[in-house]
Amino acid sequence: MKVIFLGSPGAGKGTQAAVLRERYGLAHISTGDILRENVRNGTTLGKTAREYMDSGRLVPDEVIIAMMEERLQKPDCQKGFILDGFPRTVPQAEALDALLDRMGISLDGVILFEVPGDLVLDRLTGRRVCGKCGEIYNVHFKKTKVPGVCDLCGGELVQRDDDREEIVIKRLEVYEEQTAPLIRYYEDKGQLVRVDAGQEGELVVAAIERAVGQ
Ligand code: AP5
């Protein structure tokens, strides 16, 4: 399975990617996760990315493209991969097309996560993430047994800096302006498959599996 997950912030891309990664042994490549790890580790990339991420803007294309060219060539991608949060602009999509061509890889599909806007706001402001293992929870939709403590590893739950309401609103605007044009881009290439991501998680996963013929 070699797929792109496309959809607004909070559409459920990371949540469903985690399920499919476990089920099929895929590489789950989340540009957001890679950038956050670099911010935590204080790398040069992290220092550049932080100011963009904290204000809800996109990190410059050239930075992301260089990062992904390196990541996609790692051996764990050979069994299949989910690109979560990349590409996010038309120049990123064009660079990805060129890279996949050079590598002789064709995509199985681009999954568009469709979800109503009001649901997205509740999902994002209610999201909590385990600071230790990265498991994703939600104070409205996926509660832990003990408040604030990860069910899987006992780690402490944290709220992402960019999940504050004012930043969420900016991220949704940026999505409409810079990422939504990719819907047309992949529709024109005959690669887009729409999935109702407003339904319960397992149903979303099943719809994705049907879409890519699993
Ligand atoms: P990134 O980390 O990619 O954030 P995002 O795209 O905004 O996506 P999210 O992680 O917010 O949403 P998601 O769809 O994964 O939702 P989730 O599954 O967690 O990017 C962060 C920043 O990094 C960007 O703003 C930018 O600055 C930078 N960046 C990243 N990639 C870049 C790129 N390519 N170019 C430039 N800059 C880049 O779910 C959300 C919540 O909903 C969770 O609490 C979950 O439990 C709940 N939920 C999920 N599914 C369901 C369901 N079916 N039912 C009920 N609840 C659900």
Image: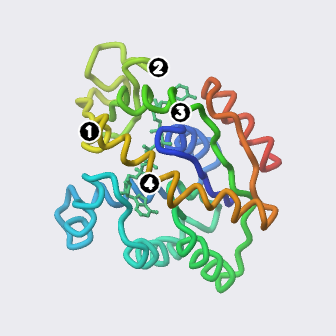
The first of marks 3 and 4 along the sequence is 3
Task: State the residue at coordinates (75%, 42%).
Answer: 209
Cα distance between the residues tagged 2 and 4 = 25 Å
Q: Secondary structure at mark 2?
A: loop
Question: Residue 4: where, in percent of width, then height?
Answer: 63, 57
Locate residue 107 relative to residue 170 in the image: left or right.
Answer: right
Q: Return the x and y of residue 114 as percentages of the image width and height.
A: 64, 39
Ligand 1 within 8 angstroms of badge 2 C-beta: yes
Please tell me whether mark 4 sits on a helix, a strand or a loop. Answer: helix
Tell me the residue that label 3 is attached to.
117
Q: Which of the marked residues, 1 or 2, is nearer the chain's N terminus?
A: 1
Upstream in the sequence, badge 1 or badge 4?
1
Q: Nearer the viewer, mark 1 or mark 3?
A: 3
The circle on residue 131 is 1
Camera-side residue of 133 and 115: 115
Q: Amino acid at mark 4?
A: Val
